[in-house]
Image (spheres, rainbow, N blue to C red):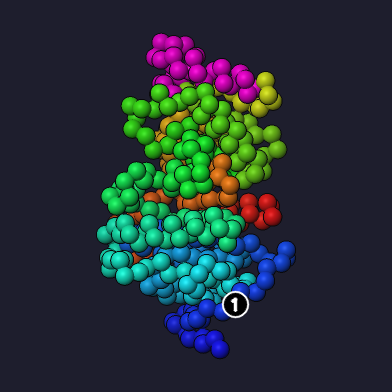
Amino acid sequence: MEKRQALACIFVWTMDSPCCIAHPAMKPVIALTLGDPAGIGPEVVARTLPLALQQCRPIVFGHWPSLREAIDAAHIRIDVQMRATPIASDENVVTVVPCDGPDTPIIEPGRASAVAQWQCLEAAVDAVMQGRAAGLVTAPVSKTAISSVHPGFIGHTEHLARRAGLADDAVTMVFASDRLSVGLVTTHLPIRRVADEVTSERLARTVRHVHAAASSFGRHVEPRIAVAGLNPHAGEGGLIGREEMDVIAPVIASLRDEGFAVVGPLSAEAVMRDALAGRYDGVVACYHDQALVALKLAGVGESANVTMGLPFIRTSPDHGVAYDIARKGLADSSGMARAMELAGRWVTSSA
């Protein structure tokens, strides 16, 4: 017999029970990770759970004491069921799969926990790969911390590609919103390597993924896409570099022949301004900061990070772990809410 115990503002079932059989009318299952519990992950996830319950049957993976503390601090009243295995509960119930074990160190706010964030990420990915969840929403992690115990980790995007059996460059980091979708040809690379990595194949893949994101998330029937040049002033006709002439322009011409509404290469300093003003529905940037500086100046939380090209939907907020404000009640959960909303929309439309 199940035992239900009141804990502050939530109810917790303390033992597993059989999950009801899913049917087409039931909400889809989406996995959420806490990221690093020493950062703002627990807080932004806790505040997003009421929204998640409206869209799906959420399974949260992570350090339960940190999430419970965040739920209590935010005075959120929800039903939570603890499970040792990732089996979604009935609708209107949040399933929590604790990922802490004997090797999990004590969590100290502001002090990175590589083990805790890795454990919840891998458990969630396992669940998605096993078909137990239709999508994945990830709270921020520290790349530096995880790489200290798992060398080679440079971010969610590349790691998820490898877990899905894909090459790092088979997927695209896209920041999507109703207004604008921005994709990156390269992601987490030293700037000195960027020019060599902006290849025809990667550029074409990025344009296609931005087109798909703008169509799906932005709901633009025929997205207008602009491609930013790699060099200042888009190379000035070869005066400041030939990548625009030798690589970017030929790809754009080829894609236009296929019917894509794509223009460029354009000067990066102007293309983001024009896109944010509504001239374009999508932008392709050659490297990370070329896009992210402008987007974050435009407002954190408006877009969500979407990994295009995976066999499942994955989204995340457009910010980091923010160790400096962990447990202070200052975190902005709008980015996590946006990631949850986009994931729910995509999974529901794909069902």
Q: Which quadrant, please, contains the N terminus?
A: bottom right
The residue depicted at 65 percent of the width and 44 percent of the height is 216
The magenta-colored residue range is 230-256
Looking at the image, which residue is at 51% across and 44% down? Answer: 165
Q: Is residue 340 above or below residue 192?
A: below
Question: In the shown orientation, is residue 169 left or right of residue 40?
Answer: right
Residue 103 visible in image: yes
Left or right: where 147 falls relative to 155? left
Could one spot residue 76 in this view of the protein?
A: no
Residue annotated with mark 1:
18
Instruction: Name, please, the residue furthest toward the right.
Output: 24
Vertical placement of residue 121 versus 203, above or below: below
> Dot 1 surroundings within 10 Å: few (below 14), some, or many (20 or more)?
few
**Magenta stretch, main secondary structure class:** helix
Q: Which residue is nearer to you in this view: 275 or 218?
A: 218
Residue 200, x across and y down, in percent: 52, 23
- The magenta stretch spans residue 304: no
Residue at the (46%, 29%) spot, across then down: 286
Residue closest to the eye, 198 or 278: 198
User: Residue 118: x and y, percent?
Assistant: 38, 57
Q: Quadrant of residue 178?
A: top right
Q: Secondary structure at mark 1?
A: loop
Residue 316: horizontal and vertical position, in percent? 48, 51
Residue displayed at 54% across by 54% down: 129
Q: Is residue 73 above or below residue 198?
A: below
Is residue 184 depicted above or below 94 in this figure?
above
**Is 315 on the left-hand or right-hand side of 262?**
left
The kind of residue tagged 1 is Pro
Q: Residue 207 at what x, y percent from top left?
A: 57, 31
